[in-house]
Image: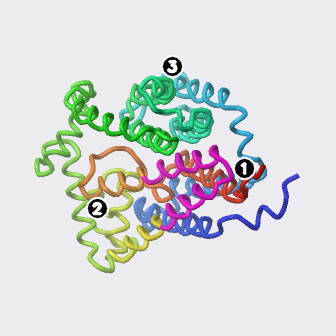
Amino acid sequence: MIDKKLFKHIDVMLIVIVVLLFISSLMMISSATHVTQNGLTRQVKIQTIAFFLGIFAIVMILFIDYNTFGNFQKGIYIASIVLLVAVHIPGIGKAQFGARSWINLGPVDIQPSEIVKIAFILSFAKFLEDRQNKLNTIKDLIPVGCYAAAPILLILKEPDLGNALVFMVIAFGMIFVSGLDYKIIGRGMLAGVISLPLVYKLLAPHQKVRIDAFLNPSDVSLPGNYHVMQSKIAIGSGKLLGKGLYHGTQNNYNFLPVQESDFIFAVLAEELGFIGALVILALYFIFLYRMIKIAKNAKDVYGSLIVVGITSMFAFQIFENIGMTMGVMPVTGVTLPFLSYGGSSLLTNMIAIGIILNIGMRRQKINF
């Protein structure tokens, strides 16, 4: 039985922020899918169902000591790899939006890479815990790099560059706080910069086009640039207070691509204006701050590493998604946490919050 006193340590502020973001999500998704003309849309229904399934998942997670996940590290990691391989099996995997990233379950499709984000963090945190402060040489980093590379390469094969980048950021954030030698960081950054031309050559043609489009934003003949331009028009036309909910012209005339998901922030900025966008950014800032605080106060290294991994995931997705709507980041399929439409994404994010709350409420240090 769980000690009821633990629930006194739950981060209520984090819960409040998630609820506020979800309410904002329903408003913006309903606007992006034109509920005033189409009635209650499938996207709004799925987002609502995913949220309540997420609440159920959070409650279940709170009753499990998070260290239990560490005991099944190998099993979780193997299951993650199996899920990522399954998308390539005929009859199971499903291709859509230009990538084979989905598994068809009849009435719904699930995106394994979303689920694997959390599974990878749980298993990688345990893997790193055993190697804390032992990452002083390239030799020490080889097994760590191989562990992280397997899921990343499988996601790149789909191909899903956006989620692969999320995994890279997660892995780097967790490795960084595990005691990675600063000299190695410097050499790694230098090697990364030098290898950029080679990395570019290895990219798939459609990925190269995205990079070319980002480097030449004024060329609307390049795929994506026209949509980014429309996104910037939407954000700018919102001015201070916005055009009003359901009254965004860029939104209503469908100038924005995947506006209920990838470009949801542009819809929000157009209809709620600078003030509305600023409120959302403030919520995200507090959201990330609360998680960093939980990471610092975790009772053990395993808990801290899990929170760092999840915080890295959210931070990158927020920065990348909002950045691409403004043209300061390349366009990818990375969603905006808790705001973008996506059942798999929202449920995964809710599970992540459940794990964060779990670690936070068990934050008392173990004294020997």
Residue identifier under label 3: 90
Residue identifier under label 2: 253
Q: Is residue 22 magenta?
A: no
Residue 238 position (above or below residue 335): below
Q: Does residue 92 appear in the picture of this structure?
A: yes
Foreground: 292 or 94? 292
Asked whether, in this view, residue 136 is left or right of residue 254, the answer is right
Secondary structure, mark 2, is loop
Foreground: 168 or 88? 168
- Residue 157 x/y as whole percent: 40, 25
Look at label 2 and name its amino acid: Tyr
- Residue 273 x/y as whole percent: 33, 74
Question: Badge 3 local density, few (<14 within 10 Å), some, or many (20+)?
Answer: few
The span shown in magenta is 286-315
Asked whether, in this view, residue 170 is left or right of residue 199, the answer is right
The scheme the figure's colours follow is rainbow
Please identify, in this view, whether the residue under mark 1 or under mark 2 is nearer the observer. Answer: 1
Residue identifier under label 1: 61
Foreground: 13 or 175? 175
